[in-house]
């Protein structure tokens, strides 16, 4: 496939926000493409080179990119930078500066999708001495053979600024539509994607070998499984009413990891499927000693503890283990306990379809007693009162709360279902849970804060079906002076000129930023508001959205990316929970 054709579709997709249109255009793209390009196409549509678990990121800096443009345009770098300052978009700068140059070349050669992908891959993976020059040359080679439109797409891709807005569900819908004209195969494709986290693999297998091969896909070590997520209910009684007799596990406030073992080889992934093996040498060692299965995939919560007192440390301490340098010293300072709560695969067998009770039984069997790994603490309960009592014990021990688990449910990979129901300390307040929101902009400080140039952030929740971020709160409390400076510095690195295309906001911000950083917020309650876009159009009053009342910053969540933020659907559910909880309170509980 010619890259020109792909760039033309990308150009169109960048300006579409309508999900149906996107799906149809993508379906057409997959249909017309060479079958051998299916995998690469799926990755490029996602804006990646490989799934996250490979840890391959292109992220070329503006400086190097500008140098490549200057080289091909035959202009001094200063001129490129001046044009960039004016346009605010390196892709546009490349397109305009290379216009004349490229027209001369175009007759001679055309770029294939493969060639572009191969060069991208080499740019991403070349390292060490001289690698900067290599990267510039690889990019310059592509630019000197591309039309202005192709140059624009290439530059936006390598700098991470392609605004395609294609969420994974849309790509799955498109694959189904391509084959059968509607979305009916999405659940089958999604199941395979949830078990392997690799859209390229799913697209390639589906397009080349059909749906039967997709049905055969199961978990495999070193392909992370997308995590099951927990629902919420308003009270212990409501949980037992929903699940009947159920398991209740301690909810540890640490860092969720998925451990894969094949013989002596152990790899660890975050809940976003990023590779984390190098950060947890202590866990790797413990897995080799404490896990009896030859091959397995299990999940657990890693939590730092105080070796002297045996107390668990807060999330802010555990998260310090997420680092590239000084790993050994931090492991010594902040030892980890890993509380295993799910066994998903063991010795050739897919366990995701088994009932929780059976998975838990097998999990207990494969963990040998030892210092680092233990199955999560749990009990079986029949009544709300028993659940409540265990909850109080957990909270008393400094834990976050509990997660109730449906004894009969399979593992709901990649989905938020009532198979797991969380119940946290913060439930006792009016707002049933903290919210993870994405920062989309910030405000200049007023009054006392003028000297920091920072007064607070504008935050949004995530609409996963439409891949949009909708604002829910302006947050000014909870930042100390040091944090204000840190947030400003962090956000200034991702400034954008205008409100990002995938953000819905009724109010403005002094500075807009790329939706990237996630913060946990606490608030008194959710209220209806004409000022915020969250849930707009989904409430009885069409011109009201939902907002957080008295929002406060709890902490930065460096383990979450924008798409892990609380979703619009969850916010609507929380709003319902809040209504039910307040009627309980009014009823005199
Ligand atoms: P939340 O992040 O508040 O939605 O709660 C779900 C998270 O709780 C999971 O993603 C895990 O990281 C964490 N967690 C802690 N203990 C458990 C447990 N026993 N079972 C499942 N998840 C747990």
Image (cartoon, helix red, strand yellow):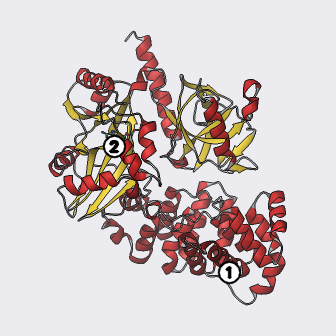
Number of the front mark, 1 or 2: 2
Side (left or right) of 58 relative to 95: left
Q: Position of residue 211 (x, y in %)?
A: 37, 69
Side (left or right) of 206 relative to 133: left
Label at residue 493: none
Residue pictured at 66% horizontal, 59% vertical: 161
What residue would you read off at disc 2?
Answer: 335
Image quadrant in which the N terminus is located: bottom right
Numbered circles on residues, count? 2
Residue pictured at 63% horizontal, 54% vertical: 18
Label at residue 141: 1
Secondary structure found at label 2: loop
Residue pictured at 72% horizontal, 46% vertical: 499
Ligand 1 resides in the quarter of the picture at top left
* Closest to the observer, 535 or 395: 395
Secondary structure found at label 1: helix
Does mark 2 have its CB less than 8 Å from ligand 1?
no
Q: Where is residue 74 in the image (x, y as percent from the top left)?
A: 82, 78
Rate crowding at label 2 as few (under 14), some (14 to 19) or many (20 or more) other CA atoms within 10 Å: some
Does mark 1 have its CB less than 8 Å from ligand 1?
no
* Closest to the observer, 522 or 205: 522
Q: Where is residue 588 in the image (x, y as percent from the top left)?
A: 39, 9
Q: In this picture, is 522 found above or below 202?
A: above
């Amino acid at each position: 496939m010619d890259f020109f054709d792909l760039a033309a579709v990308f150009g169109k997709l960048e300006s579409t926000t309508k999900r149906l249109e996107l799906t149809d255009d993508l379906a057409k793209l997959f249909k017309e493409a060479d079958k051998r390009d299916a995998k690469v196409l799926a990755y490029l549509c996602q804006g990646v080179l490989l799934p996250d678990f490979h840890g391959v990121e292109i992220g070329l800096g503006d400086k190097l990119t500008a140098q490549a443009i200057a080289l091909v345009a035959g202009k001094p770098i200063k001129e490129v930078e001046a044009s960039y300052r004016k346009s605010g978009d390196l892709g546009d700068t490349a397109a305009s500066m290379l216009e004349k140059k490229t027209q001369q070349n175009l007759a001679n050669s055309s770029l294939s999708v493969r060639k572009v992908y191969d060069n991208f891959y080499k740019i991403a993976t070349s390292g060490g001495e001289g690698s900067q020059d290599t990267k510039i040359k690889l990019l310059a080679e592509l630019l000197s053979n591309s039309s202005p439109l192709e140059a624009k797409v290439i530059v936006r891709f390598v700098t991470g600024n392609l605004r395609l807005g294609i969420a994974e569900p849309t790509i799955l819908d498109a694959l189904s539509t391509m084959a059968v004209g509607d979305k009916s195969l999405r659940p089958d494709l999604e199941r395979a994607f949830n078990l392997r986290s690799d859209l390229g693999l799913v697209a390639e297998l589906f397009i080349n070998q059909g749906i039967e091969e997709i049905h055969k896909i199961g978990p495999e070590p070193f392909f992370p499984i997308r995590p099951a997520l927990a629902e919420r209910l308003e009270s212990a009684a409501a949980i037992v009413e929903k699940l009947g007799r159920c398991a209740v596990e301690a909810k540890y406030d640490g860092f969720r990891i998925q451990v894969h073992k094949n013989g002596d080889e152990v790899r660890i992934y975050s809940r976003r499927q990023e590779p984390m093996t190098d950060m947890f040498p202590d866990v790797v060692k413990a897995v080799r000693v404490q896990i009896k299965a030859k091959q397995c995939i299990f999940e657990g919560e890693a939590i730092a503890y105080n070796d002297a007192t045996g107390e668990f440390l807060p999330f802010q301490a555990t998260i310090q283990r997420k680092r590239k340098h000084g790993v050994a010293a931090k492991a010594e300072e902040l030892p980890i306990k890993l509380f295993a709560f799910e066994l998903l695969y063991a010795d050739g067998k897919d366990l995701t379809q088994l009932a929780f009770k059976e998975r838990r039984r097998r999990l207990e069997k494969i963990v040998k007693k030892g210092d680092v790994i233990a199955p999560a603490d749990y009990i079986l309960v029949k009544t709300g009162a028993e659940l409540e009592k265990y909850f109080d014990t957990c909270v008393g021990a400094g834990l976050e709360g509990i997660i109730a688990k449906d004894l009969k449910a399979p593992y709901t990979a990649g989905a938020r279902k009532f198979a797991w129901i969380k119940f946290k300390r913060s439930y006792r307040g009016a707002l049933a849970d903290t919210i993870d929101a994405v920062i989309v902009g910030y405000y200049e400080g007023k009054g006392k804060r003028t000297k920091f140039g920072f007064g607070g952030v504008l935050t949004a929740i995530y609409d996963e079906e439409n891949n949009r971020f909708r604002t829910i709160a302006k947050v000014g409390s909870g930042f100390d002076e040091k944090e204000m400076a840190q947030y400003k510095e962090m956000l200034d690195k991702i400034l954008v000129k205008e409100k990002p295309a995938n953000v819905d906001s009724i109010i403005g911000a002094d500075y807009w930023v790329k939706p990237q950083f996630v913060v946990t917020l606490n608030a008194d309650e959710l209220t209806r508001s004409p000022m915020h876009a969250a849930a707009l159009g989904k409430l009885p009053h069409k011109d009201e959205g939902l907002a957080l009342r008295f929002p406060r910053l709890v902490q930065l969540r460096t383990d979450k990316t924008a798409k892990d933020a609380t979703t619009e659907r969850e916010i609507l559910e929380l709003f319902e929970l809040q209504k039910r909880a307040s009627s309980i309170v009014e009823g005199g509980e």
